[in-house]
Image: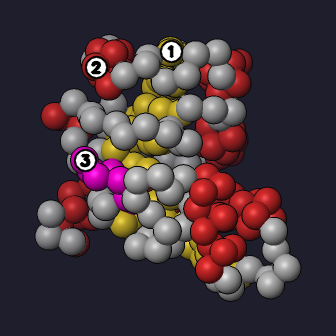
Amino acid sequence: MLKMAVLLSGSGRTLDNFHERIQAGSLAAEIQVVISNVQGVLGLQKAEKYGYPAFHAAGNETINDILQNYEIDIICLAGYLKLYSPPPALSRGVINIHPALIPSFCGDGFYGHHVHSAVKKRGCTLSGCTVHFADENYDEGPIILQKSVELDYGDDIDTIAAKVFAIECEAFPEAINRVNERGIDFFWKRVGK
């Protein structure tokens, strides 16, 4: 079972998903701490309600100072909207979810509705999400798992976002379970990093 920290910037919908699946026994992880770079967000309130230690920390240094107080195997970026630099001991243990099929619609500036707008503008009939390890560049770490969803010609940006988020709720926990089963190094060695 993986001990994880959750970093978020907003409402905590992915935290809700993690918590529900941990309670149901379908996610092989334990949340040790939740940290947000934005003060007072709903995600921190939810963390407190669930009984997780919850902190606001504006930058990497403060986040990493907090993490020193917990035993952590992985750090999950759950709607965390900044580039995060982990402590050296966890440099290969940061997992992110991206709302598109990498290498499409990814990199600096591609997050949330920016991604879905680009997908709509391009006329894609398929989108999805990618769960991957994070490194020092946006969306370039080893891929753990990808899931796709079909889009209809008439789907607007909000509909695309809803379809992708629904598949994210399956993919992120499944990816964490795969990391628990295979280990972190398996995924980094797969791509020769």
Q: Which residue is mark 3?
A: 136
Q: Quadrant of residue 145?
A: bottom left
The single residue placed furthest to the front in the displayed view is 121
For the question of whether residue 145 can be seen, the reply is: no
Query: How far apart are labels 3 and 1 at the CA level?
Result: 23 Å
Q: Which x, y percent locates residue 121? A: 66, 75
Tag 2–tag 1 contact (CB < 8 Å): no
Picture residue at 64% right of the left edge, 15% below the top:
40
> Magenta part of the protein: which range?
132-139
How packed is label 2: few (under 14 Cα within 10 Å), some, or many (20 or more)? Answer: some
Q: Quadrant of the N terminus?
A: top left
Q: Nearer the viewer, mark 3 or mark 1?
A: 3
Q: Secondary structure at mark 3?
A: loop
Picture residue at 50% right of the left edge, 15% below the top:
56
The mark that comes first in sequence, 2 or 1, is: 1
* Mark sitting on residue 129: none
Three-letter code for the amino acid on which mark 1 is drawn: Phe
In front of the other: 24 or 102 = 102
Three-letter code for the amino acid on which mark 3 is drawn: Glu
